[in-house]
Image (cartoon, grey):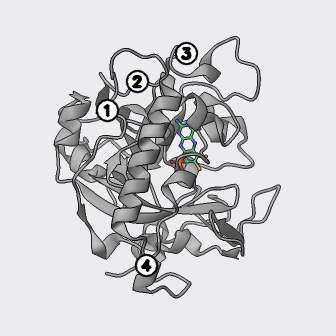
Amino acid sequence: MLIRRAGPFTANDVTDETLYLNRREWMVGAAALVLMPGEGEAATPQGQALTATRNEALSLQETPTKFEAATTYNNFYEFGVNKEDPARLAGTLKPRPWAVQVDGLVHKPKTYDIDELLRLAPLEERVYSLRCVEGWSMVIPWIGYPLAALLRRVEPTGKARYVEFTTLLDPSQFPAQRPSFFGFSLEWPYVEGLRLDEALHPLTLLTVGMYGRVLPNQNGAPVRVIVPWKYGFKSAKSLVRIRAVADEPKTSWNRAAPQEYGFYSNVNPAVDHPRWSQATERRIGEFRRRPTLPFNGYGDQVASLYAGLDLKKHY
Ligand code: MTE
């Protein structure tokens, strides 16, 4: 199934692969030099290539956002509030060794080493757009596999109705988690959640890479979730725990500002954020704003999950 999006495109819109790879390699190298000065050992696999097969049916036919923009304009509050903070500071994050605890209301709880997690299911490349609640969006070739593949391994019990995602809590790796940090801060660790059926939806991607490489630290290395029909903040980064639970998880943004950030946070141009409109968005790299689509354009696949639910109330 092809996802139809606004805006004509041609084969010429696609970045020349060789140019793109060269530029990317250069940038990854440059980033490593800038971010990890003086580190003796290569403790992280930053920049390592990841082979994945493009899932054409679930990929947008749009030119991806430039790698440089996608890795230098980030929200990752554990590094600070400014968009450039994550790229500048993320060298302190160590994506190896790394383990992800998958537990809660499941028959077979297990703590996965990240390298085992990477091999659990065939890696796919999926070009998704990510719509941030702030009114911008990007188009990113993510690499991963359906979160459902992992959840089915651990066998959620009949009592499991939601899935909670928790980001690493470690002030030595995340400056904004230090008590001495000065500036806006959330309650740590960062927690997000989905209903179990949302988590099991085939579009929900357990994500380990982007642009043919492992995830850069600033994009949530070594593993995050991507939920393309929801505002970007639902797609929690650098996960250490995925837990099946009975009740709606208490999520970080909902705790911080419940009137502004609901649990569902489906992209919805008809429901404004209390402080700004959600009707349009700016794709990073473009000048003109474009209309925001319900469910970020994935309505055909996901609207049925919300049949009978008042999406104005459950924003
Ligand atoms: N995950 C954690 N742990 N911390 C964060 O601050 N920011 C969210 C989301 N996941 C965030 C997070 C927001 S607001 C967005 S828009 C996306 O990550 C941005 O993902 P990107 O930097 O890969 O584009």
Quadrant field for ligand 1: top right
Residue under circle 2? Answer: 94
Q: Position of residue 101 (x, y in %)?
A: 30, 27
User: Distance of mark 3 from mark 4, alpha carbons?
Assistant: 42 Å
At mark 3, the secondary structure is loop
- Between label 2 and label 1, give the one nearer the viewer: 1
User: What numbered label is drawn on residue 171?
Assistant: 3
Tag 4 residue: 300
Closer to the chain start, of discs 3 and 1, is: 1
The answer to whether the residues at label 2 and label 4 have Cβ atoms under 8 Å apart is no
* Label annotation for residue 179: none
Using the numbered discs, state the Cα–Cα distance from disc 2 to disc 4 in whole angstroms.
Answer: 39 Å
Is residue 311 visible in this depiction of the protein?
Answer: yes
- Residue 47, position as x, y percentages in the image: 35, 40
- Amino acid found under the numbered disc labelled 1: Pro
Q: Contact (CB < 8 A) between labels 2 and 1?
A: no
Measured in 3D between alpha carbons, the distance from the residue under mark 2 to the one under mark 1, in whole angstroms, is: 9 Å
Label 1, on which residue? 45
Q: Secondary structure at mark 4?
A: helix
